[in-house]
């Protein structure tokens, strides 16, 4: 982050240099928490005892889906053996940071049908007392989970109506128009009409091309209730 500020100094307004300390302080606090809510990978911050300190929007969705759980303030798994493996990995990461080595380690939980991939790294604040235990960041993702934009993004990017955006997302999941129309409870003829408008507004001609365009514009936008 400091290197970034130094790199930009020659092209940024002069005021940037004098406020760089304040800027970096903000980024490591409120701005950083907000930024973590907009990435697709779930981020948990825990202490050495697996007690949760921070949960990003994507991480909350993993908990809501039941893939991970919170019990008495501790990060756990609904499966006992996974909880044991998770806590062992957190402990090892903390021990590594205390000894001066804190590389990211990786943990795979679950089977082929419901894999959860974790990247785990312990972080010690250089300004904190040496007696204070490091915090641990866990980056969690489900490879089998398709990530698509929501209707707000498609309406804003392409000027789609709500009905057209819903159909576009259903098509991006990989099924044909008839199946998508059935899931949305609309007539196939209505679906064809929507799809024609979607092609025009997105400047695409085929469903495969539409899927690529839609996938390229996704952002991990928190739900309206949590964003507030």
Image: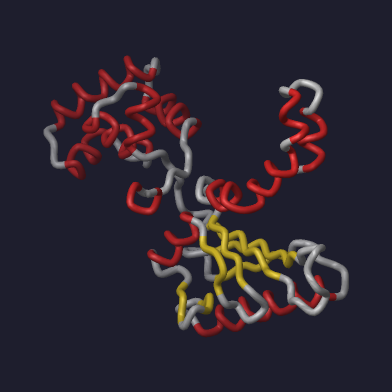
Tell me the residue at 65%/68% (across/down).
107
Colour scheme in use:
secondary structure
Instruction: Depth check: give the residue in front, 111 or 215.
Output: 215
Tell me the residue at 33%/17% (across/down).
201
Residue 165: name its quadrant. top left
Q: Is residue 9 left or right of residue 188?
A: right
Q: Is residue 132 above or below residue 195?
A: below
Tell me the residue at 57%/69% (across/down).
53
Q: Is residue 32 above or below residue 160?
A: below
Residue situated furthest right in the rendering: 100
Q: Is residue 86 left or right of residue 146?
A: right
Residue 19 rendering spot, x and y as whole percentages: 72, 37
Instruction: Depth check: give the residue in front, 124 or 66.
Output: 124
Tell me the residue at 24%/32% (across/down).
162
Residue 38 rendering spot, x and y as whole percentages: 51, 45
Residue 11 rendering spot, x and y as whole percentages: 76, 21
Instruction: Depth check: give the residue in front, 41 or 205.
Output: 41
């Amino acid at each position: 982050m400091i290197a970034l500020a130094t790199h930009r100094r020659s092209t940024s307004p002069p005021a940037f240099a004098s406020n760089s300390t304040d800027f970096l302080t903000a980024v490591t606090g409120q701005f950083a928490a907000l930024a973590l809510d907009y990435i697709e990978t779930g981020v948990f911050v825990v202490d050495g005892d697996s007690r949760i300190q921070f949960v990003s929007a994507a991480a909350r969705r993993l908990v809501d889906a039941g893939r991970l759980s919170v019990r008495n303030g501790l990060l756990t798994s609904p499966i006992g053996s996974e909880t044991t493996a998770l806590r062992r990995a957190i402990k090892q990461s903390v021990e590594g940071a205390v000894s001066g080595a804190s590389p990211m380690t990786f943990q795979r939980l679950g089977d082929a049908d419901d894999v959860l991939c974790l990247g785990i790294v312990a972080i010690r604040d250089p300004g904190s007392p040496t007696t204070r235990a490091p915090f641990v960041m866990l980056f969690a993702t489900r490879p089998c989970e398709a990530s698509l934009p929501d209707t707000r993004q498609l309406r804003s990017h392409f000027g789609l109506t709500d009905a057209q955006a819903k159909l576009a997302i259903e098509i991006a999941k990989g099924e044909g128009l008839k199946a998508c129309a059935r899931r949305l409870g609309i007539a196939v003829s209505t679906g064809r009409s929507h799809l024609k408008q979607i092609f025009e507004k997105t400047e695409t001609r085929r469903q495969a091309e539409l899927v690529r365009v839609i996938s390229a514009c996704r952002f991990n936008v928190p739900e309206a209730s949590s964003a507030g």
